Image (cartoon, coloured by chain):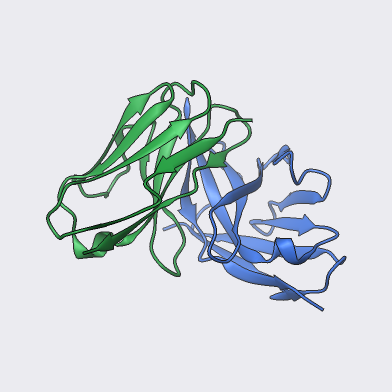
Chain colours: A green, B blue
Amino acid sequence: DIQMTQSPSSLSASVGDRVTITCQASQDISNYLNWYQQKPGKAPKLLIYDASNLETGVPSRFSGSGSGTDFTFTISSLQPEDIATYYCQQYDNLPSFTFGPGTKVDIK
Amino acid sequence: QLQLQESGPGLVKPSETLSLTCTVSGGSISSSSYYWGWIRQPPGKGLEWIGSIYYSGSTYYNPSLKSRVTISVDTSKNQFSLKLSSVTAADTAVYYCARLVVMAPAHAFDIWGQGTMVTVSS
């Protein structure tokens, strides 16, 4: 099984700050990684697929990078509406999917 | 636009079978580009993929749940369903249905239902 870890588990940042979340896979998953945003009480929303491709309609302040086992998700300028938990998800081990444990982002 | 809606009992007794249905509206469940999936989230915890199905009926299950899970599709009703047997309190969660888009090699859950809370309790 492929295990996913994320760090930090939570963070607080100020509006306008650059925020970075990392996701690590237990084995090489190429670029087979997605990022989701989940606001409280809501369903997850796909933000980035294939590690770095922005889903249609998602603001450009969100970005992703990485390949192999180490991945990064960045919010270039944190906005109040970005308060959410962010999850990475691998799809290298099809047809199974594994989500990371999540990173909760708050406003300082 | 495409929408997904989960439905089913919000309370299930231990050892019984949890049954949920996802109704797809605004598009066809029989599209060749998509699979359909179930994902759950225990209160205060992360996301767990349960399984996926293609409109032809091909199914794929999380190995950790495989012995208890059945996912089926009814193309005439544009619905797919989840059955989880022998439930315990550990199965208490919000259950989401979602569309799995395949843009080879990418696979992503791009449209989600609002989720339905299922509590296992006597």
Residue lying at 76% horizontally and 64% vertically, measured from the top left: B19
Q: Position of residue B69 (x, y in %)?
A: 78, 50
Number of labels in the image equals 0
Quarter of image, res B78 = bottom right
Residue B104 seen from this side: no
Residue A96 in picture, x, y percent from top left: 62, 35
Question: Residue, x 84% and y 69% (percent of image)?
Answer: B14
Is residue B76 shown to the viewer in this render? yes
Direction from residue B61 to residue A108 in the image, left or right: left
Quadrant containing the N terminus of chain A is top right
Q: Position of residue A41 (x, y in %)?
A: 45, 70
**Residue A63 at x, y = what percent?**
25, 39
- Left or right, residue A46 beside residue B18: left
In this view, B38 is above or below B117: above
Vertical placement of residue B98 versus A54, above or below: below
Q: Nearer the viewer, residue A3 or B47?
A: A3
Question: In the image as oriented, which residue stretches furthest toward the bottom?
Answer: B122
Quadrant of the snapshot with the C terminus of chain A: bottom left
Q: Camera-side residue: A66 or B55?
A: A66
**Looking at the image, which residue is at 70% across and 55% down?**
B76
- Given residues A51 and B31, the one toward you in this image is A51
**Depth order, front residue of A46/B63:** B63
Q: Quadrant of residue B115?
A: bottom right
Above or below — where is A2 with respect to B77? above
Q: Is residue B65 found left or right of A7 in the rendered image?
A: right
Please report the residue visible at 87 percent of the width from the left and 65 percent of the height from the top: B15
